[in-house]
Image (cartoon, rainbow, N blue to C red):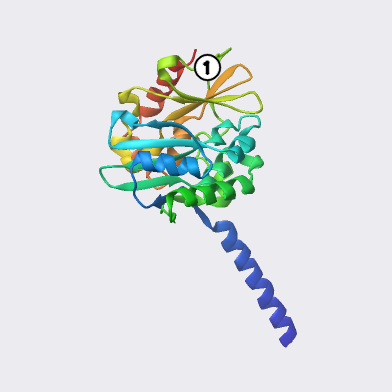
Amino acid sequence: MTRMISKFLMALSLIVFASAAVQAKEAAYFTAPYADAKTVASKLKKAGFTVLTTYSPAKKSYLKVVVVTNSALKKAASKPKRGFAAIQKVLINDKAKTVLTTNPTYWLKAFLQKDYNAGAASSTTKALGKALGKLTPTEDALTGSKLSGYHFMIGMPYYQDMLELKKGAKGVKGKKQLFALKLANGATLYGVKMSKSAEGFISTIGEDKALVLPYTILVEGGNAYALHAKYYLAISYPLLSMGQFMKISSTPDAIERALKKAVQ
């Protein structure tokens, strides 16, 4: 009887452990020690990253988003409709004296879906730590096991519910293009400069997550795609409530219009 009870308790503990592992949350971002954008970009280059652009969202000069890539990210993202995973971003807020970076594990789980590459996430996180210093997870988190199937609520878009901006697309217009990253599968990921009004939502729902910008467009197979704003903004601001998102209810349409104008 004692042996049976012992086996039962052991089995129960394994179930509890497995359940806890499944329910573990993954932070969307890490904070890092403050440094100015020039210093951050230099350290990122030394850590093996290619800096694609440094951008001030909504023309706010004290906010600077450094967009980077590396060989591991590009390789992992060179699969059909996975190009959005080819970059990571670092936000420097000179007013608040803070640095925030995307967490590769969170974003690669979300954007690579069934093609998630743990090796690319791990090596990129290690390189970010080498460049930026101690990385501390933020409270902006979602259950790791659900990231690939994330949607804000019933009726809202999933990752795969992308906007098809234009068929027969050649790319992004010159003045709107911040960078063009060619991938091994023939696709190209573009960084897009939108109008101040289209990017102004960060002032309403949080400049602390301004690295949601710049928005990106993926041109693949001759067509231009973008992540649906109702998906992308929700997964970028995982702690916001429906009431808070209602304050920017016109933003998804404004973003879609701006992206369509940017494609050529």
Quadrant in which the N terminus is drawn: bottom right
Image spot of residue 10 (x, y percent)? 68, 75
Image spot of residue 149 (x, y percent)? 58, 42
| Marker count (numbered) | 1
User: For the residue marked with disc 1, what is the amino acid?
Assistant: Gly
The residue beneath circle 1 is 171
Residue found at the very far left of the displayed protein: 95
Image spot of residue 89 (x, y percent)? 45, 39
Give the residue drawn at x 34%, y 49%.
34
Q: In this view, does 63 lie above or below 123?
A: above
From the viewer's perspective, tell me whether residue 114 is left or right of residue 97. right
Q: In this view, does 252 lie above or below 39?
A: above
- Residue 242 seen: no
Residue found at the very far bottom of the displayed protein: 2
Q: Is residue 237 above or below residue 172?
A: below
From the viewer's perspective, tell me whether residue 254 is left or right of residue 131. left
Give the residue drawn at x 56%, y 35%.
86
Considering depth in this image, is 187 or 52 the residue closer to the camera?
A: 52
Give the residue drawn at x 31%, y 29%.
58
What is the quadrant of residue 242 in the picture?
top left
Q: Say what secondary structure mark 1 lies in.
A: loop
Q: Is residue 30 above or below residue 42?
A: below
Considering depth in this image, is 216 or 182 the residue closer to the camera?
A: 182
Considering depth in this image, is 40 or 2 the residue closer to the camera?
A: 40
- Residue 11 seen: yes
CA neighbours of label 1 inside 10 A, class few (<14), some (14 to 19), many (20+)? many
Image spot of residue 169 (x, y percent)? 55, 14
